[in-house]
Image: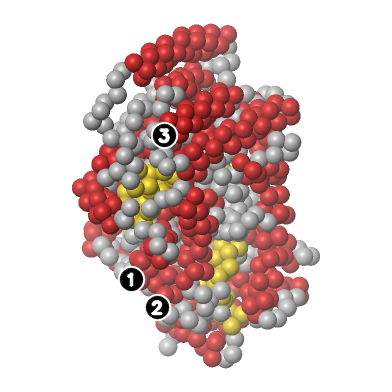
Amino acid sequence: MSTLERLQSIAQNPARVAERWKADGGKVLGYRCLYLPEEIIWAAGMLPYPLYGTPEPVGLADAYFQSCTCEFIRNLFDHALSDRLAFLDGLALSNTCDVVRRLYDMWSRHVPATPVYLVNNPQKLLGEANRDYFMEELRRFRARMEEIAGREITDDGLRDAIALHNRTRALLRELYALREQDPPPLTGAEALEICMAVTVLPADHADGLLTELLAELRGRQVEPSDGPRILVTGSMLDHPALIRMVEEEGGVVVIDDLCNTSRTFWHRVEDDPDPLTALYRFLNSRALCACMHPVEARIEHVLELVDTYRVDAAIDFNLKYCHPFLYEAPLLKERLEAEDIPVTVLEVGHDLSGHGQLRTRIQAFIEMVSV
Amino acid sequence: MSIEGALRYYLGTGIGKGVLRFERLRNEWRLRHRAPKTSSPFSPPLSTSPWLKELISRHYLTGRYADAHRKVAWVTSGAPVEFLKALGYYLLYPENHGAVCGIRRRGEELCQAAEEAGYSRDICSYARTDLGSLLSGRTPVGRLPKPDLLLCCTNICQTVLFWYRVLAAHFRVPLVIIDTPFIYSTAPAHAVDFVQRQLELGVETAERVAGRSIDPAELERVTRRSREAVELWMRVLERARHVPAPITAFDEFIHMGPIVEMRGDRATVDYYRALLATLDLRIARGTGALKQERIRLIWDNLPIWYRMRGLSELLARHGATLVASTYTNAWGELAALIDPSDPMRSAARVYLHPILNRGTGHKLDTIQRLATDYAAHGVILHSDRSCKPYSVGQMDQRERLSARGIPALLLEADHNDPRAFADEQAENRIQAFLEMIPS
Ligand code: SF4
Ligand code: SF4
């Protein structure tokens, strides 16, 4: 099996990684989303495990969340209610949107076996007016993780965790740099699966695999394509089906800007004598998600990606009922179109329903931008 | 701000105010002299209603001319506005404007205008109403003044953050964000410090835009009046504990205008004082808002603005009414936290604690407390498609209330978009619910 195939199989069943870690006697700490540092979890000796959903219609969670709320969150809650997340020793959430805040409520009431913690990060990032506050939140998070892990988190431990995770981030940046090529040596669907696998793997293990993968891809022969170079953006896309669809219709997905792909590794933790301060600065610079402010920083970032990856057109996959991104869509569209980048905004269901219609729209869009 | 602008402002508002006063007097006269309809299940309107109408119309009238002569800020309903008042800003509340559009049945058309511009039908209908009004230039209040400053406080929802930055991009004016950490029990000190720090920075921005600095004495005065108004408002609400209730939550939804939009004004304090006296008179005479009150209910969430009358009539046909709501209560429950002698610190604390910035358990407790205090027979939980922070958790709350012997109905609707409301179905469900209530 090639390294790529190994990573793909992990992405298809991420829970296996957690279960194996548990079987070896470790603790697993689930988390969502980008605004808490996995380094703290790692330094406590636990596996930071980002939660991913599965493309199924919502079931049990419908008794707790109205049907007009984020399907991703309802799907995760389904997993929790049906004991599919029983391997978690805890769940950490960051303060992103109204629904996540309420997930905290629902989780603490109805999944008592798994303690849930909210890192109440500020939403207004950049600038240091939030520093004292955010630092205190991180100190509290650290203390809580120590409690769950039953061991102390030392500054040295944090430094090591930072160095380790920075290495993974650097390798992923290297991987993504390959996609600047024409044609890129990997497809967008593959990139998404690689990211999903790497984020669930223990970082020290992921590094080895990524290094092998890079060597593998550097020697890969790919057919040239004259399809348009596409940027994919949105919130959460935890399944490769949609990107695959774009590629099947002739688009070349060269870059993705999603909660579970490039946003996780785009920045690195810069050096600071105090590791917690370093982590604070890192999170505070990560203004990449529409939940955060200023949104201009995020739009600038997308424009930069457009430049670097020589993007011809963009597809905004808006997860149904995901407010932060729904509000942002017209702004982003306007800005990209001002740069002559055609954009289509597609509302998509998390359970992969309605894909026939989506395919028609994607087809039409690719055709339109190909002429 | 030119002389011409000042002239327009004073002339426009001056003449308008005269007209509004005349209308009020005429309406008051009519109220006193017109024979009440005997067939109506309701007592005659509260005698202060014409005054309220004058107050609110005057606010929008001033708004029409405000940007010619004063600084204007658009603010969220939960925002700490005392410092803007002290700096002389005219305040416009897009949410309240949204409600006015809703009451006058303009919500759907304005929502559609926003949808045509690319805003999803799944975002809050207040935001859609507001953006639709902005993009189409249509409003039932004549004209909205352009803002010089936007103030957005995330203590009600995160939607306002996303919505206000669209406004900021549209108007290209400074946007002050008060980023309020979520509170599950009580606010930790570092959260209060954080909000206070942001308030201080917000004051600096507001001073720069206004071109003057804040007078601490004026800030204290405004804060004092805010507190006074909030306390009076709470007393107004508490009058409904009386059986029969002299005021219903339907009335309160309208009478809450000043506490939201004109908190900190002298006129607001005067108005609520008069309203309180009216209610006391009703209580002394044993007059209820409903002639035959049989079932007392608590309402959770925003009102359904475009169906207020229909709903209140439907309930009244069964001798039922709303005696309290978590929504109107939200504007009164924090009175004790307001400390005029330390306006910034107390604002930081107060504005961290609205019901929507807290856990669902807090809301459940509030509903239960209201049910006890107001001797209610049941609860209607309006599941508002637009408002996630308010609505998520209600299904759970319904179960828990029922388990504690308080019947609760989950009513699916939307506060401003009538397309999300199925009249007949709602009517049947309400009817079935009322029939089930023992009274
Ligand atoms: S940001 Fe969007 S995708 Fe993420 S949890 Fe919130 S609503 Fe769901
Ligand atoms: S109705 Fe709810 S979502 Fe809309 S602005 Fe108000 S609090 Fe926010």
For the residues carrying marks 2 and 3, which lies nearer the camera in this image? 3
B125 vs B73, left or right, is: left
Identify whether B355 is placed above or below A224.
above
Residue B141 in percent (x, y) is at: 39, 24
Residue at far right of view: A273
* Residue A140 % position (x, y): 68, 66
Q: Give the chain letter at badge 2.
A: A
Residue B47 appearing in the image: yes
Q: Does the numbered disc 1 mark a residue whose Cβ is under 8 Å from ligand 1? A: no
- Judge left or right: residue B95 versus residue A48: left
Circles 2 and 1: CB distance less than 8 Å? yes
Residue A317, position as x, y percentages in the image: 38, 57
Residue positioned 59% across, 90% down in the render? A25
Q: On the image, numbered disc 3 is attached to which residue?
A: B286
Q: Amino acid at mark 3?
A: Gly
**Vertical side of A227 occupied by B93: above or below:** above
Report the chain holding disc 3: B
